[in-house]
Image: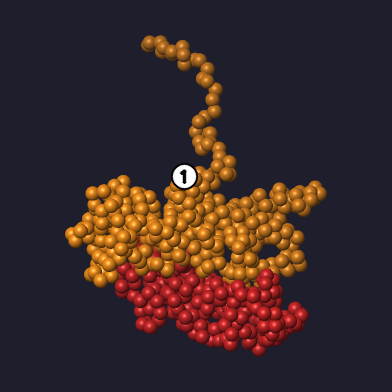
Chain colours: A orange, B red
Amino acid sequence: MTKTQIEKSLWEELESSVDKSEALSLKHRTYAGDVWFRFRHKPASFVGLVIIFIVLLFAIFGPMISNHSYEKQELSFVNIPPRMNVYELGKGYIYITKNLKPIHIGNDSRLIKALPRIKEDLSKKRTSYDFDSDVIFVDYSSRPFKLMSEDIDIGKTKYILNKTYPLGTDKLGRDLMTRLMIGARISLLVAFIAAFANLIIGILYGGISAYIGGNTDNVMMRIVDIISTIPLTLYVILIMVVLPSDTGILSIIIALGTVYWVNMARVVRGQILTLKEQDYVHGARIMGTSTWYILTKHLIPNAMGSIIVTVTMLIPQAIFIEAFMSFIGLGVSPPMASWGTMCNDALEALRTNPYQLFAPSLAICITMFGFNFIGDGLREALDPKLKGR
Amino acid sequence: MIKYIFKRMVMMILTLLIIAVLVFFLMHAIPGGPFTAQRELPAEVEKALMEKYNLDDSLPKQLINYIGGLLKGDLGPSFKYPGMRVNDFIREGFPVSARLGLITIIFVLAASIPMGIVAALKNGRWQDVLSMIIATIGVTIPSFVIATLLMYLFSHKLGWLPAFGFDKPTGYILPVIALGGYAMSFLARLMRSSLLEVMGQDYIRTARAKGLSEFKVVVRHALRNAMIPVVTVLGPTIAALLTGSFVIEKIFALPGMGKHFVTSITNRDYTTILGITIFYATFLIVMVFLVDMFYLIIDPRIKYEDGN
């Protein structure tokens, strides 16, 4: 029988360690971290966040980089589309506008100037223009009109993109790109300020109503009921009509900020009503904490989840109402641009210049999608029970 | 039940009264009188006008006059169109708006409910994904954008449908889609989530275990319960359709009440703005009340004895 050899090292004491399988394998996350994790891992809401970030950059820095002004009218470059059908000449391109004005475009696709008119020959139905000391004719005797140089027809050549005005110009020759950026500023500014005002009013109103309870609650909520029996848009219209129109953006902020808090007040009240029966609130009250302190330090922070969701839903609503008001002629006053007024202006010329409609409509749609995605994502992230609804 | 209905009626009248008073004072808060125009009016003419419209009375007396007129169904004269009364605008425009609204509601119900049902029953499959994509688009894109884009595509580019007016029946198609788009999407989403929830209930499993056909389970057991939330939001949906119709009527140049409303806003024709607002408010409150009564009938579990 051989003696069993036991390695010396086996007698040595093992390193004392907590069993890994017993340990919590997940990293500890705070509530906010948890919400952020769930939010981030939903593609739609993340896309929404990126969209809004881009729109914000566009609104804040766009007008600074842009070398046009949103209000300067360039009456010789009216209704120039972003994609132009041009005639190619040696010295550059010629674009003929809808009202038959030739415009000289450089070889780099930048607009140079409207060609000066020499003379209109009514009998031959053509107008002659001075193109760098050459004479060219716009012949409108037959449809479609022709561009002629010394009786030779210059055939249509190609489409080029407008490098001076990437989104074209409007009926007064203003750069649509810059106006879109200014419009983004207006829309976001109105939306954020109005949402913030509604947040404050709604939290205070709903919080006080629920916390005091009893008859105060009853009366305060009946008032909310009465306000919300008719659509809030009507109040906004009434307030906008009454406020002097030269205040422009301020009046729309006031109108939106003072009307849309009713939903917020209801949400906050519902939350506070359940929260105020919690033991820690009773505890605080027994310890003699003031009402204000309980409200601001215990109740409102705990109701924050649904409040945030309501706010993110309020922002796209505010953008929509602003656009709606501007669209029916109650929004910002010209020459200020807003997406709604841009849509409204474009509607008049929809048949001839449809490109003017697409940019502002697309901007509104993208922004609305962005905020709605964020709102949906936040709602699910804050309340995982809602998943899949 | 009768007590509840009575209570609601009193509340309704009270609400209307409050709105009327509110609206009246708003009207008088406007800087400058209704006759402040670019051209200065001679003092005598202005005085005569003030007298004609009883604007020289004291404020409380004017209020009483106005409320008195409202009770008789008179909304007062239009300040911008001499000889026209606000009632004339309503009489002229309401039938057009009402017809558009009715068709839109029928379209909304006929489209959204089947869409929601299909989406819920085919949960997670392509039908569901497709319906929810449509619904998301409808909820996010404002109606006036949808309207203008539809108009550009179908009447200007393709030339299939008229761009304005109701001369042909096809003239209704674009306004109805544009107006009902939001409500349809919203109701479809609601229908889907509500049916999904009901389908997970125990009584559905019981019904299946009894050996009922899937059709019977869905129609007899699930749908009846899943419809309730949809009916609840019908009142506010009608409200949304009404306000949405301002801009749709403007875009499609329809001679409805919304168009008068928007025109009176641009003209700053105060009495017309306020008169139409009051009319809208009354109409909406009555509609919401009727929907609530209907809700009471279809859901026997709800009892309104204590008015909650």
Is the residue A66 above or below the residue A7 in the image? Answer: below
Q: Residues within 10 Å of mark 1 (few under 14, many from 20)?
A: few
Q: Residue at x 27, y 63 (%)?
A: A138
Q: Residue at the left extreme?
A: A152
Image coordinates of residue B177 in percent, x first then y, are: 41, 72
Image coordinates for residue B265, horizontal then vertical, percent? 56, 73
At horizontal 47% and vertical 75% (from top left) the residue drawn is B249
On the rendered structure, is A75 left or right of A150? Answer: right
Query: Would residue A232 be visible to someone looking at this image?
Result: no
Q: Which quadrant of the structure image shows residue A135? A: bottom left
Residue at screen point 75% across, 82% down: B57
Q: Residue furthest bottom?
A: B72
Depicted A279 relative to depicted B219: above or below = above
Q: Is residue A139 visible?
A: yes
- Where does residue A113 sit, x and y in percent of width and height? 36, 53
- Residue A183 x, y percent position in the rendering: 50, 56
Image quarter for residue B134? bottom left
Q: Secondary structure at mark 1?
A: helix
Q: Farthest residue toward the right?
A: A288
Q: Considering depth in this image, is B249 or B193 the residue closer to the camera?
A: B249
Residue receiving disc 1: A65
Please state if A53 lies on the left or on the right of A223 as rendered: left
Image quarter where the N terminus of chain B lies is bottom right
Residue type highlighted by circle 1 = Ile
Q: Quadrant of the C terminus of chain B?
A: bottom right
Q: Residue at x 34, y 75 (%)?
A: B161
